[in-house]
Image (spheres, helix red, strand yellow):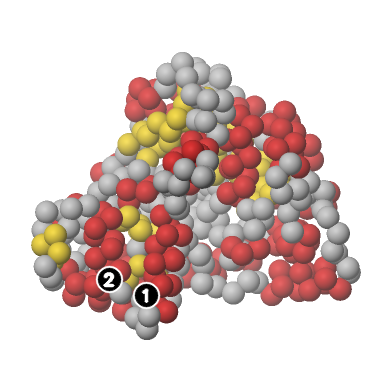
Amino acid sequence: MNPKLSRRVNEMSTSATLAMAAKARELKEQGKNIIGLSLGEPDFTIPEFVKDAAIQAIKDNYHAYSPVDGYAELKKAIITKFKRDNHLTYKPSQIVVSTGAKQSLANLAQVLLNDGDEVLLPAPYWVSYADISLLAGGIPVEIPATIETDFKITPEALEAAITPKSKMMIYSSPCNPSGSVYSREELRALADILVKYPDIIVISDEIYEHINFVGEHVSMAAFEDMYDRTVTVNGVSKAYSMTGWRIGYIGAPEYIAKACNKMQGQVTSGANCIAQRATIVALEHSPTEIQYMVDAFKERRKLILGLLSEIPGIKTNEPEGAFYVFPDISYYFGKTLKGRTIHSAEDFAMYLLEVAGVATVTGEAFGDPNCIRISYAASEDDIREAMKRVKEALA
């Protein structure tokens, strides 16, 4: 705590995923062999048609400030994508392009939350949801789920968490960190609760939509009675391996989109012009163009689950999407390994980093203190070697 800094930044948590990645880089710079399974970053190269579009944009002299809410051509491509993939109909005035889906989420919190408003977070949840809410004056309210229910909340648990101060719910499906996917029936059951509370806005984070191993992806906004109450958040980081290009977007009720445009105009203005031009081409292509990545992730899921099953004390379920496993490692709490007593998931993750040379992320940051998140967005060789090291470190 530095008294010269604002209270908001002093009280803000550091992103656990980025902190672990930084710690892993630090150890690598010291000459240690570290396998990074902490970041949610596909290891595939960007599709050639995306690269070509970016190069063409440079040749076409795109260099000036872009419109705050995105190029008209990109908004048109997003509208087409929403219709094609999600059966959602939006107008250009309902679309806002931002510098990554994280900025989209931050915009939404800033324009919707007042001090004391409660934000419902089905747990486990992505690390930044809570702090993005806190920064906007909101109060995160966790709705716990466990590995026994595939980390999905029930309608009863949702309704029990709702109070007169509930203003927003943020969830992801496929979920980061658990990989869980809400089925149409499960989402409908949650929607049946939410329709009774018309003041609650739902933020549906669908950034992992195409990395789905069970088939159908369902958007909350596709339910007619939830359309005017739901903001659909997406981007190209995960599906197209474009993490560093920083393009996210929303489809929202018009008044929310206009408010996000207003907020963004005072913070960053328009997103990177070259990345926007490349995203137009990315979204115009069929999702079948990236199926090879999904197929590879599915094989890696099978590999890592098989290897984890050979390690005593680690409990797993089968994630249905994204590229994470979220094992329960509470068996090791209170145990001493190589002279170090494990008291928490954070202790466990640090033990794996420093003893096994494998970077993971503590589940505490995701709202579940019994688990760790392991990303399998890595090569099969790295996954095999990492799990070999983990098994030996826990023996």
Dot label at residue 354: 2
The vertical placement of 314 against 133, above or below, is below
**Left or right placement of residue 50 versus residue 295 in this view:** right
- The quarter of the picture where residue 23 lies is bottom left
Are circles 2 and 1 on residues that touch, CB within 8 Å?
A: yes
Q: Which quadrant of the figure contains the C terminus?
A: bottom left
Question: What is the CA distance from the residue labelled 2 to the residue labelled 1?
Answer: 9 Å
Residue 75 appears anywhere in the view: no
* Residue plotted at (74% across, 41% down): 266
Pick the residue in front: 164 or 264.
Answer: 264
Amino acid identity at mark 1: Leu
Return the x and y of residue 272 as percentages of the image width and height.
74, 59
Residue sitting at the far bottom = 31
Return the x and y of residue 259 as percentages of the image width and height.
71, 33
Which secondary structure lies at badge 1?
helix
Residue sitting at the far right = 60
Pick the residue in front: 254 or 296.
Answer: 254
**Left or right placement of residue 347 versus residue 90 in this view:** left
Pick the residue in front: 200 or 14.
Answer: 14
**Left or right placement of residue 156 versus residue 329 in this view:** right
* Residue plotted at (46% across, 57% down): 322
Amino acid identity at mark 2: Glu
* Residue plotted at (56% across, 51% down): 207
Q: Earlier in the sequence, mark 2 or mark 1?
A: 1
Classify 10 Å Cα crowding around label 2: few (below 14), some (14-19), many (20 and above). some
Classify 10 Å Cα crowding around label 1: few (below 14), some (14-19), many (20 and above). some
- The quarter of the picture where residue 282 lies is bottom right
Residue named by callout 1? 27
Return the x and y of residue 214 as percentages of the image width and height.
45, 53
Return the x and y of residue 100 as percentages of the image width and height.
63, 53
* Residue plotted at (86% across, 59% down): 64
